[in-house]
Image (tube, rainbow, N blue to C red):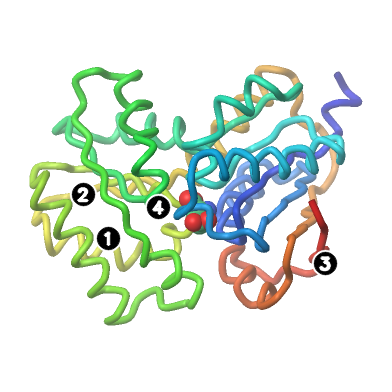
Amino acid sequence: VRVVANRPIGIFDSGVGGLTVVRSVMERLPREEIIYLGDTARVPYGSKSASTVLRYSQLSTRFLLDHGVKLIIVACNTASAYALEALQAELPVPVLGVVEPGAREALAATKSGRVGVIGTLGTVRSEAYPRALARLDASVRVTARACPLLVPLAEEGWLDDEVAEAVARRYLGELRQEAPDLDVIVLGCTHYPLLRPMLSRVAAQLFRHEVVLVDSAVATARAAASALGERSLLRDGGGGGLTCCVTDDARIGEVATRFLGHELRNIRRVDL
Ligand code: DGL
């Protein structure tokens, strides 16, 4: 077990967004080595079909397994929504997604039993969040809204300006029309934690009551710590580290730094 415990955690995403999950895992588990794979050559996954997202996810997980990982975290909400069950069934290491941890946290936070979910087209179409929530509590009512324009806004760094706010007002306004009494919104996409201050302000203006925004990146880091703890796979020494691999490196440095929260050196370009 000791030898296995010293192996890295593998985290993959469709691109750089998953670095928000890396950031949370590094804060939670600072001794762990992390190998991150961002499939930047194929991003976005959010507008692609289930079978394509599964095929791409299998390429990414094969890459991580070849690097000897002890646990795989599917940081991408769309990949978690479409591919998690298949990956769990076929891979020899534990595989965690972001949907279930986010759903758990949403359930813990709601008082009205009315939960909103925002994510990519794929995540919303898959109904993965409503299913995960229903498994945990059949009485909870879920309203989901795809917000495809938020991903490019976050990558562009337009996090808290009038354009981003106008877009958010339109999406969240539709959510409010359908479910005025919801009191939790799950940020069901890797990119949304960056937009959180703005989303929180817009939600407060629209709903006029407290709306808790659930960040599935933080919830997933907590779930990863328990998954490793239960299996005695937590590393007990070491200062941690991050190896970042991407399938395309155009524009990567600038955008990646924004998602990780500090400068990212040593980015390796790889082929799957
Ligand atoms: N990583 C994706 C997600 O969390 C967002 C970007 C994409 O569409 O690939 O759903």
Determine the residue positioned at 26% across, 73% down.
165
Question: Which residue is at the front of the view, 115 or 233?
Answer: 115
The span from disc 2 to disc 4 (Cα, nearest Å) is: 20 Å
Label 2–label 1 contact, CB within 8 A: yes
Task: Locate residue 103 relative to residue 112 in the image: left or right.
Answer: right
Q: Is residue 182 visible?
A: yes
Q: Which residue is mark 1?
A: 200
Q: Residues within 10 Å of mark 4 (few under 14, many from 20)?
A: many
Q: Which residue is mark 2?
A: 211
Q: Which residue is mark 3?
A: 266
Q: Is residue 190 visible?
A: no
Give the residue type that dot 4 points to.
Answer: Thr
Question: Which residue is at the front of the view, 160 or 65?
Answer: 65
Q: Which residue is mark 4?
A: 120
* Ligand 1 contact, mark 4 (Cβ < 8 Å): yes
Give the residue type that dot 2 points to.
Answer: Val
The span from disc 4 to disc 1 (Cα, nearest Å) is: 19 Å
The span from disc 3 to disc 2 (Cα, nearest Å) is: 39 Å
